[in-house]
């Protein structure tokens, strides 16, 4: 397997390897989110590669309009022939990518489709059965592998192996340079080295989509390599090879960074933008050389002492293109502490009436299942995540809410971590707006185009919304008699607007004044509030 030329692709491959390894663990929301981050990066890389490949085809066509090439019949015929090969390569890539997109769409559909509430997210992104059923049980993984293998052979064969224009039907040397690699290591769970099992067995749907996008990206990179080879043979100019690595970063992945004395600390230390076939990578932690396997080194030590511990990490790598050795350093820290408990408010230091207030319990050295609580003046509902809860309180405004924590220690004894007291406040008042304005000069058409009066909250951290329930209008034209209207909803236009309100809005013209007064809005705490007035001068 050759090294990818694009530094961005190298980083993507690194993250793909790490996330695939994490599938052996429980599928947490953090891992699912990491898959989405990697998939977004892969898709951006695919977009850039597609643009590059399209530009190569376009440059072939521009070359055929060059007077110097037109004046040389032999050169013109050669460029024209290699453009035809390049266009065939592009068609093969489109067909292969479409097949992979179809598999991806099937997995998404089997996982409930896209979430209508969250754009771009699969409804059951943690579904472990969809990819397994489609790609393994139904045999589509074997079909995908066969199609990718054929694609790799077919597009590499589109580059003549000698200086002739004709194709020989194969180009094994070029095929070796393509990033499509189907090798599978033997494991206890996969003794037969089954490719489909290795890629899709018990993989969450969001991970399977990321894997599909990774192969789509590999398909496009393969296309790019072949197009570069065709260009070089057509024009006798080989583009300068991009260094395998351009930017580097030390990555440290540890399952736990806060330990009690005597517990083991384990971390995976790796050099970012790497590939698993590298054999010239050296990694050290606190001066200790670590064994490197597949580009990853594992460091283990026993927790000793208290407080923050620092790991000095260094790595060196010899770039095969530049024939130079590069050195990089970084730091990682972890904490060794004693058993104690805290409650951290995820957003604010108060509880607000009418909304979910997220909080997190933590008690170092104590399992989450061994922490209990008692609440006064509030109600706790379990949320997704370890010891995460949503707190609701009925109020009243200015009262206090209390949470008492108790934990069961490792020796079976019980320890009280005290009572935590929080202020209870009502959600702040919103402010009224029309056309995102709170008053002043405004064009008549800007007001006429607005659907309603809105009541947004300014700089409030919670997802709380207010709905305008009523308002009064007072219209003072520049010439003529004033008009008044009252609305029992929020609308200024549309099918639900009240007729007298509609009449005033449609009458607006330069020089008029519009007063929206006595505006009332209902919040998530089910109380209705007066939120002020808006005064406009129609200037155009």
Image (tube, grey):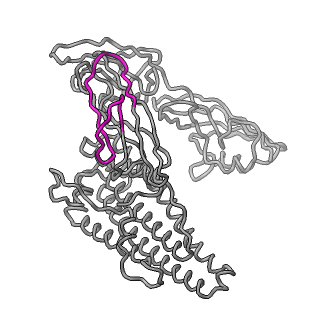
Residue at screen point 32% across, 60% down: 109
Foreground residue among 8 and 402: 8
Q: Residue furthest front?
A: 323
Give left or right: position of 195 versus 238: left
Instruction: Decide whether the magenta segment is chiefly helix, strand or loop.
Output: strand
Res. 64 image quadrant: bottom right
Res. 428 image quadrant: top right
Residue at screen point 65% across, 41% down: 436
Residue at screen point 52% across, 35% down: 466
Residue 285 colored in magenta in the image? yes
Foreground residue among 530 and 307: 307
Seen in the picture, residue 145 relative to 476 is either above or below; the reply is below
Residue at screen point 33% across, 53% down: 277
Residue numbers of the magenta segment: 283-312
Seen in the picture, residue 529 relative to 489 is either above or below; the reply is above
Viewer can see residue 130: no
Residue 386 colored in magenta in the image? no
């Amino acid at each position: 397997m050759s090294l990818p030329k694009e530094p961005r692709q190298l980083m993507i491959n690194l993250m793909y390897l790490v996330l695939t390894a994490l599938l052996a663990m429980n599928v947490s929301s953090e891992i699912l989110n990491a898959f989405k981050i990697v998939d977004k990066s892969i898709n951006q890389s695919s977009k850039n590669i597609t643009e590059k490949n399209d530009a190569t085809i376009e440059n072939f066509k521009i070359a055929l309009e060059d007077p110097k090439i037109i004046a040389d019949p032999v050169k013109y015929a050669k460029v024209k022939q290699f453009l035809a090969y390049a266009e065939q390569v592009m068609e093969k890539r489109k067909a292969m990518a479409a097949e992979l997109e179809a598999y991806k769409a099937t997995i998404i559909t089997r996982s409930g489709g896209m979430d209508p509430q969250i754009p771009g997210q699969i409804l059951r992104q943690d579904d472990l059965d969809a990819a397994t059923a489609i790609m393994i049980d139904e045999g589509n993984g074997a079909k995908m592998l066969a199609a990718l293998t054929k694609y790799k052979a077919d597009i590499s064969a589109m580059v003549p192996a000698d200086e002739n224009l004709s194709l020989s039907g194969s180009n094994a040397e070029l095929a070796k340079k393509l990033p499509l690699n189907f090798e599978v290591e033997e494991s206890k769970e996969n003794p037969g080295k089954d490719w489909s099992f290795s890629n899709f067995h018990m993989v969450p749907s969001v991970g399977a989509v990321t894997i599909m996008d990774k192969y789509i990206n590999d398909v496009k990179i393969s296309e790019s390599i072949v197009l570069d080879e065709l260009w070089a043979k057509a024009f006798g100019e080989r583009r300068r090879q991009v260094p395998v690595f351009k930017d580097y970063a030390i990555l440290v992945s540890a399952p736990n960074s806060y330990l009690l004395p005597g517990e083991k600390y384990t971390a995976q230390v790796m050099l970012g933008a790497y590939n698993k076939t590298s054999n010239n990578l050296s990694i050290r932690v606190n001066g200790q050389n670590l064994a490197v396997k597949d580009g990853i080194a594992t460091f283990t030590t026993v927790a000793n002492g208290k407080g923050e511990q620092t790991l000095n990490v260094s790595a060196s790598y010899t770039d095969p293109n530049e024939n130079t050795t590069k050195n990089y350093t970084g730091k990682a820290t972890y904490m060794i502490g004693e058993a104690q408990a805290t409650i951290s408010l995820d957003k604010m230091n108060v509880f607000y009436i009418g909304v979910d207030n997220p909080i997190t319990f933590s008690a170092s050295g104590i399992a989450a299942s061994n922490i209990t609580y008692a609440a006064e003046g509030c109600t706790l509902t379990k949320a997704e995540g370890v010891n995460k809860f949503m707190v609701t309180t009925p109020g009243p405004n200015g009262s206090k809410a209390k949470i008492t924590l108790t934990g069961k220690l490792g020796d079976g004894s019980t320890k009280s971590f005290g009572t935590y007291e929080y202020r209870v406040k009502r959600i702040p008042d919103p402010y009224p707006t029309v056309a995102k304005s709170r008053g002043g000069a405004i064009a008549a058409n800007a007001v006429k185009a607005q659907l309603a009066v809105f009541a947004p909250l300014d700089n409030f951290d919670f997802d709380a919304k207010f709905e305008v329930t009523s308002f009064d209008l007072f219209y003072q034209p520049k010439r003529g008699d004033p008009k008044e209207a009252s609305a029992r909803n929020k609308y200024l236009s549309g099918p639900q607007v009240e007729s007298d309100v509609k009449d005033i809005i449609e009458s607006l013209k330069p020089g008029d004044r519009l007063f929206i007064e006595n505006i009332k809005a209902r919040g998530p705490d089910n109380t209705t509030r007066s939120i002020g007035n808006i005064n406009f001068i129609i200037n155009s």
